[in-house]
């Protein structure tokens, strides 16, 4: 498990095992549009369905947005 320190330009951020957390956000109590955007962001799917496909052997394959630093572009 590798924990990289956040970049200096992005305070309150962490990157761990391919996931990132950006905690440098603030919403005013009366910002209903901001709250709706934040809720929609949190409720969205974890996978982009257009990147899913079925491999020739029947397994499900997921095309990554960027190639992994140590290997293939697909996981399945």
Image (cartoon, helix red, strand yellow):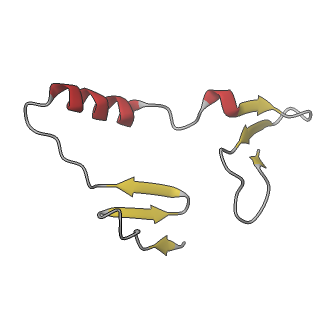
The reply, left or right, for residue 46 in relation to residue 50 is: left
Q: Please say if 42 is above or below 3.
A: above
Q: Nearer the viewer, residue 70 or 46?
A: 70
Q: Position of residue 52 (x, y in %)?
A: 71, 32
* Point 57% across, 36% down: residue: 47
Q: Nearer the viewer, residue 23 or 76?
A: 23
The reply, left or right, for residue 24 in relation to residue 10 is: left
Residue farthest toward the left in the current orientation of the protein: 30
The reply, left or right, for residue 27 in relation to residue 41 is: left
Q: Position of residue 46 (x, y in %)?
A: 52, 38
Q: Position of residue 28 (x, y in %)?
A: 10, 39
Check the picture and name the quadrant holding the N terminus: bottom right
Check the picture and name the quadrant holding the C terminus: top right
Q: Nearer the viewer, residue 25 or 3?
A: 25
* Point 29% across, 63% down: residue: 12
Residue 33 quadrant: top left
* Point 35% across, 65% down: residue: 9
Residue 38 quadrant: top left
């Amino acid at each position: 498990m590798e924990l990289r320190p956040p970049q200096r330009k992005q305070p309150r951020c962490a990157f761990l095992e391919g996931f990132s957390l950006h905690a440098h956000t603030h919403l005013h109590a009366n910002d209903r549009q901001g709250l709706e955007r934040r809720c929609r962001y949190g409720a969205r799917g974890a996978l982009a369905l257009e990147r899913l496909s079925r491999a020739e052997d029947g397994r499900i394959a997921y095309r990554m947005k960027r190639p992994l630093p140590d290997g293939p572009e697909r996981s399945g």
